[in-house]
Amino acid sequence: MPDVVLPALDEEQAIPGVLAGLPPGFTPIVVDNGSTDRTAEIACARGARVVSEPRRGFGAACFAGLCAATDDVVCFMDCDGSFDGDDLSRVASPVMAGHADLVLGARHADPGAWPLHGRVANRYLAWQLRRRTGAALTDLGPMRAAPRKALLALGIADRRFGWPLEMVLRAGAAGWRIREVPVAYHPRLGRSKVTGTLRGTTRAIRDMAKALR
């Protein structure tokens, strides 16, 4: 069954529920990206494999988790309580069955779960991805699944917020079969490291603009 990479920075509030909600057989790899709270301790106590990545950056954490994974299929999911772990089965199944090379979870958001500026930015990025890859995408899809070895071979260079965008762009350029499936999206627990601060939003825009270039 797939490994699940869970990049985490100060997510002690959310991580118990995240781990409890994973489908049976899915192996959690929590990548502690320099937390100052009990994220790593709590994850370890609940049976997750914990990997430390002191270099700050969403992409750095995802890449560390990808390198630590051992299953043929690897999934990625935010560790803030915004996703239902049960949806991972729907996301991973087409990859496991050999029907797709990259599957993204298209978010169906609860009221208040997705700030307006985040939805607008995501809509623009999805348009760019449709234009550049030819895939019928409506969402950048933080919940996703792909074959581990092929994903490593893509050579994704970004180690910050451009990681998820660069993954799809490189997959499209490589001729991958890219699909999306609907997933639930809830208000996160705690403040977002991206849209929750001006600094985080600015960094995300800069990193994704670089990936598009």
Image (cartoon, rainbow, N blue to C red):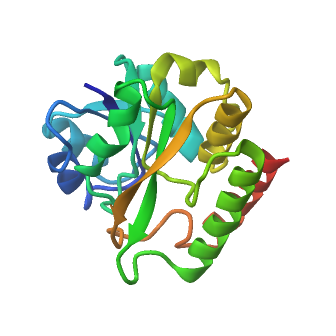
Specify whether 81 is left or right of 132: left
- Give the left or right position of residue 199, taking residue 105 as reference: right
Which one is in front, 15 or 100?
100
Q: Left of 62 or right of it: where is 165?
A: right
Query: For the point 32% across and 29% down, which residue is it?
Result: 3
On the image, the x and y values in percent for residue 204 come to 67, 59
Residue 187, by quadrant, is bottom left
- The answer to whether one can see residue 136 in this image is yes
Q: Residue at x 26, y 57 (%)?
A: 84
Residue 36 position, x and y percent, is 38, 52
Res. 201 visible in picture: no
Instruction: Say which residue appears at 49% left-offset and 29% top-offset.
Output: 64
Q: Nearer the viewer, residue 8 or 111?
A: 111
In the picture, the quarter occupied by the N terminus is top left
- Residue 112 appears in which quarter of the rendering? bottom left
x and y percent of residue 126 in the render? 65, 59
Classify 151 as above or below 81.
Answer: above
Percent across and percent down for residue 169 are: 70, 40
Q: How many numbered callouts?
A: 0
The image shows residue 25, relative to residue 211, as above or below, that is above
Tell me: residue 125, above or below residue 153: below
- For image coordinates 55% across by 46% down, the residue present is 58
Q: Of residues 112 and 87, which is closer to you in this image?
A: 87
